[in-house]
């Protein structure tokens, strides 16, 4: 992930130069540094403190995000931190407090890249045009080929579902205020968690969202979102470039993971971040309060899961 | 509906002759009789008792179904009754008892035509092939242009949702054992009921079904069903014949109502019914116990609605 | 083909009874007769002359069509003859003359079933609505899995392309007046003919049609037709019932041959024929002059092929 | 077009700075210069000769391309020239000669952006994989909303069809060696040219290409390409982000012109050009011999048009 960001900043983003990189594994850091013409440093703090570094991207292990963000805040350097801001809502809340007291509220931005995906953007524009009236329902699907080892049912929520928890309020322009965790039959090939899971989310504006997360769906990486409005419906289309006819089928390919699916979204997010820094204007990236809110909603979902699926109100 | 059945039996079903028809409005009966070369009689009982009539289709007002079915049972004539068998589960149960004591269990069949829709049949076949493992989740959508006047939120369940309540257990080969009623924001143009509604249904096999019913969706008649299996997904496609490019869009048409969407299903259902009668073999149509079961599940959904969305077990 | 017609007439067409059947192979005749409750006779003429037979379907080998049609004309019995009427335009022309002198012009109808395919019908209706102005171009594609053994490049035209040669003038409401035969690279796995072939056809109204015929396309049975009008385009859609997600692809199935693709068209054609006979009204099936015209256009295409692709005018 | 290139180079291409711009209309130059932080100069030659300019993009009127390219060659500065290199094949040939004698053959590159469109690239990759055997046929469609005023039938070929004339040999890896110009009925609303036109193109490898150009198709900007291989077919898909259900249709939008359709292609082309310049390596852009070849094929098509559609061999 970090290597991908370094490559994008170096190769397809206008106005950015990658000066220094660090990685837990120094060989990786050296390779990436070589690729993008940067210096490999011993750790993230060294990168942050490097005098030639004006801004920092944090794409390390989840449990290191908070400390690196703190270091960047201390150094008064803008930081783009991959989600999550911190593993728990409590830690996020603490960090939001530190940000607030540190000064400009937009020093820290969060990598919720779906906000930059052209399909989500077009869907949001269509909803805002209002030709079909108000949104009433939304149906989301997130399926991936395989989950990372070592997780559990709660990790599905905090690591994966968190994207829907951020993007749906942004899309529908209303926060999620109530959640309920449901489950279907679990796939026999999945041992470590309930998979798939189904979430019911209700926004302040009253929209009911169904959100399916199926991490071991095997067939492909598949992100769907459909919004039902009063007199019409609008949905993301599956991105495809070509269609093939062979072996008695007409088919289009699925991506194996998020990299091709959201490649453009990552590029556009990084470009917007760099542009905002160069022009000294606020960016449209997600901020720390968005990261906190997603974490709080995730916590409510976990509470619902632990209580057998009851509706749980999301605290402010 | 009755006129459409009469026309199909007369014109596109092999082996059937429409001999006598009746309608609440005698002028309608006369017109249809003239069209199909039948005799118009004064009421349904007269049709049932007519000596030249071998079998009867009941497509009258819902509250008249039970009595006409009783008359047919008494006359020992096979009857195809449009759903619902009776307005309440209690009345259905009574009728099932009468059928059981009357003799051959398949004298009465029910018009759940989706079982004959080529798309549902292909979907069921694909699931049964088992190449993608067991079904885990299913997502259903039923949207229509406009609801009939005079209904309420419960009527959405008993009149419209009942199709999903019959077809999904048939499709997944497992009865629905638990239900929960949920709601999104209601469309501003609908005054008489919650619309759309969302149902959660769980089968005995553990499959979780989400089922959206939106009767005043305005844009078109749209029936969807997607089944998520362990390693793949299969869904109905929207039936279309042509695609048009004009006015900056590529588009396919939606039907305005169920008639074109399920025309083939009705024809195939009637053909199967006639074939079974002519060959003296059991048909694959839904029977009275299927009708009873759908009514019992509908009652459980209404109970869930009245209790604020709690999961309600469906009694055996 | 004949067996399929017998089954359809017996099972899914209203108002028809299959009374007698014959086949070159008496065992086939016996089997089919048994299936549909008919009598197996020794040959086609015996069927035609059988007193209980009111009308005849001819679906025998191409070179036997003309004689059987003659026998039906002599017997004054309506006959539905599978295309082609006769192997050559000259023989067709002779037969048309015999029909004309025999009496009612619609005694003989021809099995150009695409005229009854719901997609072609919807496309024709859309063109006739005229919302997109006049047709200017049309693009046709006919691909099949495998050609029958024993044919040559000319057989592709007379046996297969003939469907386009009939349906396109019907669709565009204007006869084909000029043709040109073109070829792409031929598939390495095809030894007996040029495959694919490409035809340019021009209607009297000036529409230029490109028509690709690829008999050994392997991947599936695929019939396409797109009509380009002045301000919009309309095309057949591929008929599908379900869509599958598995193995990194989203896919819909192709039929292996014409039977599922045109099953509905055959049924509707037979129903229209039976209806017209029962009601004593003209049918909308193709007639002998249509069959003659298609044969004449096919001859012109063969002439173009033999002259290296030059435009050839179609004689009246 | 020039303004769009300046914006892309300045905002979404890594490694480029726009230093100086010029335009026929000095106010346009001033506005664009202001937007991208460049200096507005009096004309293209001044830009080329400006000491801070390392490389030049020419996107001026077609008849000025050759002189500006010559100036860039003289200044030994790399130039990316929008197609066409020059209005006639003769002038192109002359320029190719000048390039050859000027030194490094890749000083001049040509803006045939389709080679960078992700769909064309994916189609080419699929063909090269060879799973479906050799290409046999290809079907291209280029439809736009409206033609520029002042053109004629030949201008359709030299200005618009030229994209297919470049991209198809690149896609199929074989030059076009023979062409034939055909026409359908012309749209009544088009007065200045035959529209639509149909081209037949044959590659050295034997592939027959049908290419429809319809500039006043009104309904939208629509670029299609389908390649028929021995055992399968592959085609570009229409790029879409969302699908809408409303007013009895399911629809996706067409672009009004090439800007959104090929925005990514232009960005990727510019990025590749900048990368090649910075790294001192050859680029994958089209070069002057490609531009010459496309012009020579266009001339052959015009010759075919003037001779009534005969096949014309393309000179080497």
Image: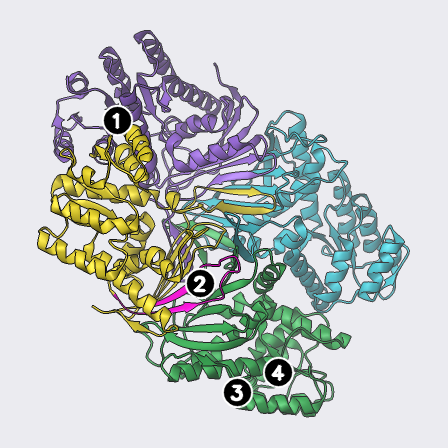
Chain colours: A green, B yellow, C purple, D cyan
- Between D43 and A99, the one nearer to me in the picture: A99
Circle 3 SS class: helix
Residue that carries the numbered disc 1 in the rendered image: C59
Mark 1 against mark 4, which lies toward the viewer? 4
Residue C102 drawn at (x, y percent): 30, 8
Instruction: Report whether residue A208 is seen.
Output: yes
Marks 3 & 1, CB-CB < 8 Å contact: no
Determine the CA span between mark 2 and mark 3: 35 Å
The subunit letter for the residue under badge 2 reads B
Residue that carries the numbered disc 4 in the rendered image: A288
Circle 2 SS class: loop
Determine the CA span between mark 2 and mark 1: 58 Å
In the rendered structure, which segment of residues is drawn in magenta? B176-201
Split into 4 quadrants, where in the image is the N terminus of chain C? top left
The verdict on a common chain for dots 4 and 3 is yes
Marks 4 & 3, CB-CB < 8 Å contact: no
Circle 4 SS class: helix
The subunit letter for the residue under badge 3 reads A
Task: Specify the label residue A89 is tagged with.
Answer: 3
The verdict on a common chain for dots 1 and 4 is no
Task: Specify the label residue D125 is tagged with.
Answer: none
Circle 1 SS class: loop
Determine the CA span between mark 4 and mark 3: 11 Å
The subunit letter for the residue under badge 4 reads A
Q: Residues within 10 Å of mark 1 (few under 14, many from 20)?
A: many
Task: Specify the label residue B194 is tagged with.
Answer: 2
The subunit letter for the residue under badge 1 reads C
Q: Residues within 10 Å of mark 3 (few under 14, many from 20)?
A: many
- Between D171 and B108, the one nearer to me in the picture: B108
């Amino acid at each position: 992930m970090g290597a991908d960001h370094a490559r994008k900043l170096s190769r397809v983003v206008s106005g950015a130069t990658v000066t220094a990189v660090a990685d837990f594994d120094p060989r990786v850091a050296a390779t990436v540094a070589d690729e993008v013409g940067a210096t490999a440093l011993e750790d993230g703090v060294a990168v942050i403190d490097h005098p030639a570094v004006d801004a920092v991207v944090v794409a390390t292990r989840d449990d290191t995000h908070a400390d690196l963000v703190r270091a960047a805040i201390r150094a008064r350097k803008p930081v783009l931190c991959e989600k999550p801001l911190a593993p728990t809502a409590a830690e996020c809340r603490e960090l939001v407090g530190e940000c607030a007291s540190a000064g400009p509220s937009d020093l820290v931005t969060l990598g919720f890249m779906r906000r930059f995906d052209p399909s989500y953007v077009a869907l949001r524009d269509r909803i805002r045009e209002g030709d079909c009236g108000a949104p009433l329902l939304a149906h989301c699907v997130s399926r991936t080929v395989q989950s990372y080892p070592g997780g559990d049912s709660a990790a599905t929520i905090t690591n994966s579902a968190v994207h829907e928890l951020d993007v749906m309020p942004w899309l529908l322009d209303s926060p999620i205020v109530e959640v309920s965790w449901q489950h279907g039959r679990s796939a026999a090939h999945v041992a470590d968690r309930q998979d798939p899971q189904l979430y019911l989310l209700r926004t302040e504006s009253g929209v009911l969202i169904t959100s399916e997360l199926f991490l071991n769906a095997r067939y492909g990486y598949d992100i769907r979102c459909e919004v039902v409005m009063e007199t019409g419906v609008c949905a993301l289309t599956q991105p495809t470039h070509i269609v093939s006819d062979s072996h008695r089928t007409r088919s289009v390919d699925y991506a194996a993971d998020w990299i091709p699916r959201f490649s453009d979204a990552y590029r556009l997010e990084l470009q917007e971040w760099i542009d905002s820094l160069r022009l000294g204007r606020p960016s449209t990236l997600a901020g720390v309060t968005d990261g906190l809110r997603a974490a709080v909603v995730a916590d409510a979902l976990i509470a619902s899961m632990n209580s057998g699926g009851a509706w749980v109100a999301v605290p402010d």
